[in-house]
Amino acid sequence: MYFSPINHGIISSFHSLLCKKFLISFLVCSLDILDKTGCALRRSFSLSLCPEDVVTLHLDLLFHSDVVFSFSELSFQAGDPILIYFDSSSTLSMLRQPVKMGVSGLCVDGNPAGFLESKSTSCTRIFTNLSKSCITDPALDAASYYRDFTVLKVCCLLICLICFQVKIIPVTPPRAPYMKDNTCNNAVSEVTYEIEFNGTHGIQSVSVRFKVTNISGNSGVSLQQHFTLHFWVSTRTPSHTLPRSGNPGFIIGAPLLIANTGATQHMSILRSEGDGSCSQFLRHTVQFGKNMRTGCKLSNCSYIQMKLYEALQGMNTAEDLAITSSARSTQVEEWTTILIQNCSVQAMNCTSCCMVPVTLNIQILWTKVGLLSNPQAQILSARYSYQCHLLKLLDVSLVPLTTVVTFADMTEWPEPPHGQPKIQWKLPFDFFFPFKVVLNGERSYRGDLAAYFLLILILSRLIILESFRLEKTSTIV
């Protein structure tokens, strides 16, 4: 990640005439679909389609260089060197990631950074003349890691580079290094590149973050530098179908679905790095029914509102929320619009202040519908509410950000239904009247009651048997 078109291999030097020839040769050998700006959206290239004179005339000129590149296709493959372009000098070179060499661990700047190879390296630099190196050595200057060059989206060696350049966005770039009291201030100690890519469409965006330090000492002072390259897949146009979070109702703990211009993805909130800073590519997934709270710190206010909103809600702004887990992006009725309450644009009566969002409250109302035996959970509505704070740009170095997700169950349960009436067995109210008379009439004969009761039962049994016999006899006759 240390660049110098003089010290490093240059593929070729393009002037305007040569660039036009390359463009002509590519157009002859391919079919293009252009957007409104004239840039190619899709291009199919094959050397077999090229006239023989075009191939032999221009490919030799293009690859005339001391540095040899081997690409299997026009799009980047894993491990291919990442190409960069210096517009001021019209030179093409490679993105490089310094590594250490030998026991001493000194930095070697010629190591090319490989596409899709996320890794971290560290090495040591020794300065014999610190006062001079502090001002002239590009390895200590943050600007040399992103200024005056761009990254190519794809390995498009046979075309002009106008439509395929990606600018490197510095995150809170530090000031240039300077000497003061025998100390070199703002010397770069750590460089982190975050590269977003999207399949065959290549590199979509590149950002770089820095950490600086102060170096003091005389001749022979050393500095250890760290270099990190991180690739992450773009979610702007998801190419796969997301797994369902239930069918049709949501399952507790399953991710929520959001949509932006028809593309569905999981709702996510900010996530912090190991040092507490806000991550640009790592996000926490919001799970149905689980309240969440996250936080991180954003360095400086140079991002102001737009970058703060991106840190809170992600690169892709959520517009709609799926009502059920099986919602289809083509069915409008299966989605509900998210209500968003932003901050005001500018603070009044303060030219050096900015009104920025510091807290995002995500409120989700849901309910259960369907049968009582198998109710299904679905979303009613959602709201993004930002809490804003007035910051003075000159006094702010870190902005703490917080995200809170709350779920509110709005289910109105019906009254339980009444069951079937129960059977109540009752004897006639005067059933025990004869026994009461006997009990109340003769107290002296209380001991014979059992005998009387037994006699009554025997007589009843005999009467029943006799009746059964007579009925049987009459039937035979």
Image (cartoon, rainbow, N blue to C red):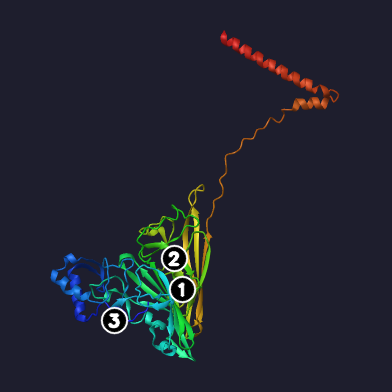
Residue that lies at the very extreme toward the front in this rendered image:
103
Foreground of the two, 329 or 5? 5
The quarter of the picture where the C terminus appears is top right
Give the residue pinned by disc 1. Answer: 342
352 sits to left or right of 117:
right
Q: Residues within 10 Å of mark 3 (few under 14, many from 20)?
A: some
Residue drawn 45% across the image and 90% down it: 179
Residue 143 as seen in the image, left or right of residue 399:
left
Badge 3 is on which residue? 87
The x, y position of residue 422, in whole percent, is 61, 37
Q: Which residue reaches farthest bottom? A: 181
Q: Is residue 361 above or below residue 66?
A: above
How far is mark 3 from mark 1, CA to CA? 39 Å
* Tag 2 near tag 1, CB within 8 Å: no
Q: Mark 1 Cα within 10 Å, few/some/many (few <14, many 20+)? A: some
Quarter of the image holding residue 42?
bottom left
- Tell me which amino acid carries mark 2: Ile
Tag 3–tag 2 contact (CB < 8 Å): no
Secondary structure found at label 3: loop
Q: Which-is-in-front pick, marks 3 and 1?
A: 3
* Residue under numbered circle 2: 338
- Measured in 3D between alpha carbons, the distance from the residue under mark 2 to the one under mark 1, in whole angstroms, is 12 Å
